[in-house]
Image (tube, grey):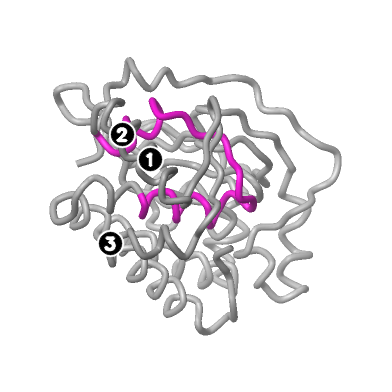
């Protein structure tokens, strides 16, 4: 399983920078009818999210929902012995605050920023009133996404048991690459080791092997995808299954998510 301690995580609760006008690349919002987007626009603020910033925390009241644009987040849960397990990843295809869809005001997981970037933020009260209670196309769209996310969590759990570290590491790189919007993104061996639940030395060994094959390059704190097809070949089938589920989930609303 993908584990690391809460102490290692070193979560930050830095202030969120706001911008004057909402500008969104979020696929869920972009797929809505123009009338629905315009209806929700007054309740959305563009914010800048920082690395390892906590957006919602387990068993605490959800104050805001975040529609991700350029930011990427990790969803984690904590075990009774203090370890933290990563259970999901989100980018511009998703939103943070899933519990509200089911009428639960407290979060059932902690979500922190993996790659800093931009998001659109909505107050939870506005989300309940203007999305959930309105019972319109936005609610339907978000419920389809929640179904996809649940499937991804299940696939991650199976992957952690069934596949070796190199296969899981390639799957993780692909999922992050899909959401990063660029071939190069910030990623340290230490952070990747805690996401995979393995020793840093193991990640370093595998990264060196992938680099020798010409699949990736890396400098201090940054990873570059140089041969995506090669990484896909090294990954387990879980990546393909997750991608196929994304396509099935959003068939009704077109292409919500396209990998690089």
Give the left or right position of residue 34, taking residue 213 as reference.
right
Across and down, in percent, residue 189 comes to: 40, 29
Q: Which of marks 1 and 3 is nearer the N terminus?
A: 1
| Residue 252 in the image, given as x and y percentages of width and height | 53, 84
Q: Which residue does the image show at 68% across and 47% down from the upper left? A: 120
Q: In the image shown, does 127 or 4 lie closer to the viewer?
A: 4
| Separation (CA) of disc 1 from disc 2 | 37 Å
Task: Residue 81 in the image: state x and y as whole percent.
Answer: 14, 22
Confirm whether the magenta stretch covers residue 196.
Answer: yes
Which badge, 1 or 2, is on the more N-terminal residue? 1
Distance in Å between CA atoms under marks 1 and 3: 31 Å
Q: Residue at x 36, y 52 (%)?
A: 170
Return the residue at label 1: 107
Q: Position of residue 73 (x, y in %)?
A: 49, 42
Task: Identify the residue under disc 3.
Answer: 236
Q: Are marks 1 and 3 in contact (CB under 8 Å)?
A: no
Residue lying at the far bottom of the rendered structure:
252
Instruction: Look at the image and give the residue range highlighted in magenta.
Output: 170-197
Residue labelled with disc 2: 205
């Amino acid at each position: 399983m993908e584990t690391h301690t809460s102490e290692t995580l070193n979560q930050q609760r830095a202030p969120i920078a706001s911008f004057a006008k909402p500008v969104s690349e979020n696929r869920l919002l972009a797929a809505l009818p123009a009338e629905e987007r315009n209806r929700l626009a007054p309740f959305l603020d563009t914010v800048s999210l920082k690395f390892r910033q906590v957006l919602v925390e387990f068993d605490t009241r959800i104050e805001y929902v975040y529609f991700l644009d350029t930011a990427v987040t990790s969803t984690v849960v904590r075990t009774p012995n203090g370890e933290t397990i990563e259970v999901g990843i989100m980018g511009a295809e998703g939103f943070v605050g899933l519990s509200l869809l089911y009428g639960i005001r407290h979060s059932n997981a902690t979500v922190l920023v993996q790659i800093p970037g931009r998001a659109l933020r909505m107050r939870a009260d506005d989300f309940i009133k203007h999305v959930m209670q309105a019972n319109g196309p936005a609610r339907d769209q978000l419920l389809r996404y929640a179904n996809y996310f649940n499937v991804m969590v299940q696939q991650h759990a199976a992957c952690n048991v069934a596949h070796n570290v190199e296969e899981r590491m390639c799957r993780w790189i692909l999922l992050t690459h899909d959401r990063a919007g660029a071939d190069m993104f910030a990623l340290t061996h230490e952070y990747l080791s805690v996401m995979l639940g393995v020793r840093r030395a193991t990640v370093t060994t595998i990264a060196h092997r992938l680099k020798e094959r010409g699949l990736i390059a890396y400098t201090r704190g940054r990873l570059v995808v140089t041969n995506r097809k090669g990484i896909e070949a090294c990954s387990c089938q879980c990546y393909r299954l997750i991608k196929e589920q994304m396509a099935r989930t959003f068939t009704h609303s077109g292409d919500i998510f396209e990998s690089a």
